[in-house]
Amino acid sequence: MPFVLEISLKPHLFDAHGASVAKKARDYFGIPIDSARVVTVLTLDMDLKPEQLESIRTEIFTNPVTQISSYKPLDIPFDWAIWVGFRPGVRDNPGATALEAIEDIFAKKLPPQSRVYTSRRFCIEGKISREQAATIATQLLANDLIQQVKIFSQKDWDPSTGTGVIAPKVLLNHKPVVSSIPIDSDESLLAVSQKRNLALNPNDIPTIRKYFQQKQVIVARRRVGLAEPTDIELEYISQARSDHCNHNTFNGRFLYREQGKKGITEINSLFKTCIEKPTLEIKAKKPWVVSVLWDNAGVARFDEDNCYTITGETHNSPSNMEAYGGAITGIVGVYRDPMGTGLGSKLIAGTWGFCVGPRDYDGPLTPKLHPRRLLDGVIEGVRDGGNKSGIPTPTGCLVFHPGYLGKCLVFVTALGIMPSKVGGKPSWEKTTKKGQLVVMCGGRVGKDGIHGVTASSEVFSANTPAGHVQIGDPYTQKKMMDFLLEARDEGLIAYITDNGGGGLSSSVGESARFSNGVEIALDKVPLKYEGLDQWEIWISESQERMTLAIEPKHLARFMDLSAKHAVESTVIGSYTDSGKLHITWKGETCAFVDLSLLTEDFPQWEFDALWLSPEERGLAEPVLSAPEGSYTGLLCDMLDMPNLCSREWINRQYDHEVQGTSVIKPFVGVFADVPSDAGVLRPVLSSEKGIAIAQALLPGYSAIDTYSMTACVMDEAVRRVIAVGADPEQIGGVDNFCWPTIAHDPKKNPDGQYKAAQLVRSCMALADICRAYNIPLLSGKDSMYVDGHLPGKYGERHKVSALPTLLFTTSAIVPDVKNCTTADFKMPGDLIYVLGITKNELGASQLYELLGHLGKNVPIVNPAENLALYRALHKAINQGLCASVRGIYQGGLGVALAMSALAGDLGIFADLSKVPREGNLNELALLFSESAGRFVVSVSHENRHAFEAAFAAFDVARVGLVSDTGDFAIRGLDRRTLVETDVNTLRAAWKRRLGGLI
Amino acid sequence: MTPRVLVLAGYGLNCDYETEFAFEKSGAQAKRVHINSLISKEVSLTDFHILAFVGGFSWADDHGAGVIQAVRLKYNLGREILDFVEGGRLVIGICNGFQALVNLGLLPGLENDYTKRTVALTYNDSGNFRNAWVRVAANPKSPCVFTKGLGVVDMPIRHGEGKFFAEQDILDKLGENNQIALTYANLDGSPAQGKFPQNPNGSLLDIAGICDPTGRVFGLMPHPEAFIHPTNHPRWTFYREVQKRKGLENPPQPAIAVIKNAVDFAKQAF
C-alpha cells in the first residue's frame, strides 16, 4: 500500500501560489473565493519502514522553518478541497527527482518498480457552489487530458482518509507483438493504414507495394524470416514520408495562376526554388555561412574559433490541447537541435513567439482552452523549459488574433555555439561509419507522442497512459547536455542527432544513411514501463533523448562520463554498410528494409494555387477623414491596442541573463519596461563580439497580401538587428511558416487554392528579399494545417483557420558590443530624426484595426533603397553618432516616438510637417502609417553635423527634439498641436490592459 | 599565490561558466567540478580555497529550491564541507547556491552550528519567477568578507524562491551579529522597506544576502557573476551617453567586486 505524505506551508506564512489561484478565480470567472492554500501530496509507492518514512519526511520533504507535513491528511481549513493529480503515464518530473533524493539518503538504488507520484490539494475558503468549485478545478487547476480531479466539500471530507490513495501507475498487461500487414491490393493496405492510424498517403501506397513485391526483396526477406511487411516497417515508412519529416508540401509542385490573368507559373518545389536556391547563391558570396540546409540547425561563423548554430520550431497542436505541456516540450525540444548539430553545440539563447485568440474573448465559439488560460499555460511552459535549461531568453513576441482560436501557435527558436574545430576537424561535419555503435542517451521510452494527437480519442481507463500529451523535462535534458559537451570536447562523438518527431525511426534512419546501413536490437532500448509493442518503441517521441554514433574504442570512456553526469546511455545497435535497416527483437528480425526505399520515386504532391488580388476580393481603402479634435486620446488608445500594449509580464518571468552574456536585454529604459528592438548577447565572455537576435510577426498583413506580409516581416526583423548595431553584411534568417491547409477540397477546404496561392506568394517574397538583403536562410521550419473545428452556440462546428503566418528570425554579428544602441531617448535637447519615407500605407495597420477597417494599401518594401540606408545607419552607429535608435514598426511613427519617450522617461516636441513622405499624406497617415524601412534616431547637438552629413543622400529629416520636461507634444501640418500630453499619461495607457499581470 | 576556486556544476546547475569566468577575471584559478567528481573523490575539496555554490535549478528545484542538492551534499560530503568551513576557507552561495547553503545549515551558522536549518528562502510574494535588476546595499558593519567596501551596487535577481524568511528571534540574532550583509535598497541606497519591486520578493528586513558569524560563508540571491562587464548593466547605453557628454558621472561598477573581495582575501589568508 503506498504512503501518502502531505506538505504545506506553516499556517502563519503567506501562500503565494494559493493567493494567485484565488486571484485568478476572481479575475477570470468572478468566483468570490476568500483564500486558497496549496498542499503538496506525495504518494510513495514503495516499501518503507516507519523510521525510513520519518527520515524521508524530515530530511527531504519538509523545511522545518517554513513547512508542516504529515502522513495523515493535514488539518487545513477549507470550504472546498480540490485534489489534482496526473493521469497514468504523464511525465511527473517532481516524482522523478523525489526518487533520486530518497535513493540518496538511503545510499542505495530502490527496486525498479518504486515510484513517487506528486499531486496537489487546494484548500479553498469562500461561499461558493459545487459548480463554481468544479469550474475552478477544470478550467484553472487541471486539464483532463493529463490530470484527474477530485472535489470534496467540507461535508464529504473524512479527516482520517483525506483524498485517499491514488497511485497512477501504468499497467499495460500486454505482450509485445510484431504484426504482418497484407499488401495484396492498394485498397487493403489503405484499409489497414486507416485502421491502425498509420497515416500512409494513398498516393504512396503503390510505390510501397511495388517495393515489397520485387523478387530480390522477397528473397532477401525470406532469408531473415520475413514475408509481408511488418507493422514496424510500415510505421518507419509512414514516419519518413510524413509532411512533418519529409516536407511534402514545400517540396510539392505548385501550379500558380492569378485570377483575371493569363498564364500559369509552375513551381517545382517551393523549398528548392525559394529557400535552397537563394541561400546557396548567397552562401557562395558569404564565407561566414558555414553549413546550411541539411543538419538540425544552420551553422554560421561567429569568430575564428567559434561557430554559432540556429534553428526554429513550432509546437502548435500539442500546446493547443495542453498549453503548459506543449510549450515546455516545444522549447526543451528545440534546444536539442543545436545540441544535435555538427558534433554538438552549447545552447546560448532561446526566443519565443506566441499567437493566440483574444485574451478577453467572449464570443460563441468554445476552443478546448480559453485563450487566456492557454496563454497562461504557454507562458509558464516556456518559463520552466527555458529557465531550468539555464539558457537565456533575450526576446520574444506575441500576437492576438481570433484566427488562432482554432489553433494557437507556439514558436521557439534556439541558438548555440560550438568551437570551429573539434579534435582538429571541422565541428560542423559528422558522419556514421560501419562498426560504430548506435547509442541512445537521456530519457527512457514510453507511449509518448505515438501517432500524435489521434490517440486523444481513445477511451481512458484508470491505468491507460495518457502519453500522447507530453511534458518536457528540462532537468534530465540539462544533465544530458552537460554530459554531451564534455564527451564532445574529449572527441568521443562521431555523430549526434536528436530524437524528435519520429523518435528512433527518424534519428536512426537518417544517421544510417551515411554509413548505408544499421542493425538495431530493439529489446535493448530502456523503457519507462513494460508492454510496448516493437513499433511503438521504434516511433515513440519520448523526450530528452539523443542518438549518437560512438567508436567502440571510445565506449568505455563515454559510459564513464555518462555515469558521472547521472545520465542513462545504452548501446542499441551498430552501423553497417549493408544498405539495410535491420531491426531485431530478442534475436528475431522484425524489420529488414532497404534504406534506398525512401529515395524511390514517391509521387510528388501537387497543388493548384489561385491568387485573387486585393482588388479582385473587393478590398478598398476606407473613406476616412482625419480627426478634427485632439489626437491625444487616439494615441492613448493605440498604445492600449492588444498587439501594441505592454506585455512586460511575459519576458519578466524568463531568465534573460543566465550565462552572463546579456548586452541588450528584452527591456530598455529608465524603468526597464519598454521592449528592445532586438536582444544582443556576448556568447564568448572574453570577446567584445556579439550576436543580435530579433524576430517579427505580422500576420494581419496576410489579410491583404502575403507577399507584402512576408516582405514586411523580413524587413522588420532586419531593421530590428540593425537598430541595435548589428552588421548588415552578416545577417542570417530563419523562416518559420505556419499556414492553414492548402489542399483544395470542395467541402472541407473550399478556399484551398487561394491559401495555396498565399503560400506561393509568401515564398516568392522570401526569395526576393533574401536576395535583395543578402540573407541566407540558416534554418527553417513549416507547420501546415493551422485550422481548428470549434463548436458554436447551437452545437454546430466552425472551421477556424489562422491567418497565414510567418515568423522570421534574424541573427547577426555585432562587431563590437560596446557600440550597441538602444531605443530610449537619452538626453533633453537631443535632436530627433526620422529615417526613411512615410507613405500612404495604412492597410491592415493597427490604426485601421482600431477604427474597424482593413483597407488595401498594405506596406510595400523597397529593399534596394532600404539596404543603402541600413548600411549608412550601421556606420553612424559605429561612429557613435546615434544616442538612440528605434525602428518604426506596427503603430507607425506615433507609437515609435512614444516608445522612445517612455523608455527615456523624457518628453518630446515633434513637427509632422518635417517628416519625409511620399505624396499628399494626411496626419493620420503620417502618425500611424506602417511603411517599412524607417527608424527614429536621436542625436546630440554635438553630433548634428556629422550625422546630417552621413545621411545627406537619404530621405532623412530632423522632426523635433527631446524635451527636458515630460511633456509629449506633436504638431500637425497646419501647425496645429495634435497631441499634447505627457509620458506618464502615455505610460498609463500603454499599461492599462495587461500591465497589472505578473 | 593564486587562490584556487571550486565551482560546483551538474544536476541542473547553470551559472557555472560565468562564475568560473568571474573568479578567473578576479585573479583566481577557477575550475568547474561536477558534484559527482567530488563525491567520487576524483577531485578533492582540500585542494581549493574557495567553494562556490552557483545558481541554477539543481534537481529542478522540485521539492524546494536547493533542497535535494543540500541532501546529496550532506549525505555524501557533509564532513568534508564542514572541515572546509572550519578550516577558515571561503564559501559563497549565489541564488540556488544560497538556497542550498541555508538548507545545508551552513548559513546562518548561529552559535557555530553549521548543520541546523534556521532560515529559509521561500516563494516570492508575487508567486512567480522574476528576472529584474535590483539595487542592493552592503552593511558596512558586517564581518562579511565578500561585501567589504561594496557600498551600493546593482545586480540582477532571477528566482522564484528568494523571499528570506526566519522567525523573529533568528532575525534579531542575525541583526545583532551584523550577519545581514546585503539588503535590497531604493535608488538612493536607502532600505527598500519591503516595497515592490525594489524588494523583489518580499524578503523580511529586505534581506538579499547573509553571512555566517565569521563572514567567510556568504549567500545572496542576486547574481554578482551576471555583472562582469559594464555592458551587463541594463542602463549602460545611457551611462555611455552621459559620460560622453559630461564626462562626469561614474557608471555603475560591475558587481564582480563581491567576487574580487573573496579572491583578494584568499590571496592574503592562504
Image: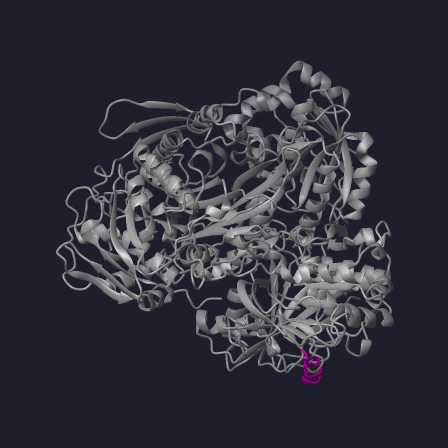
Write the residue at 59% across / 69% down: B151
Q: Is residue A561 above or below residue B64?
A: above
Which picture quadrant has residue A273?
top left
Residue A566's spot in the image, x, y percent?
77, 49
Q: Is residue A311 above or below residue B219?
A: above
* Farthest-out residue, left: A974
Instruction: Count the numbered circles shown.
Output: 0
The region drawn magenta spans B166-175
Relative side of A93 to A317, left or right: right
Write the residue at 53% across / 23% down: A602
Residue B10's spot in the image, x, y percent?
73, 52
> Where the N terminus of chain A falls, by quadrant?
bottom right
Relative side of A219 to A339, left or right: right
Residue B234's spot in the image, x, y percent?
49, 58
Write the residue at 74% across / 67% down: B101
Helix, strand or loop for the magenta stretch, by majority: helix
Between B65 and A91, which is closer to the camera in this rendering? B65
* Farthest-out residue, front: B247
Q: Is residue A236 magenta?
A: no
**Residue A322 seen from this side:** no
Residue A378's spot in the image, x, y percent?
51, 56
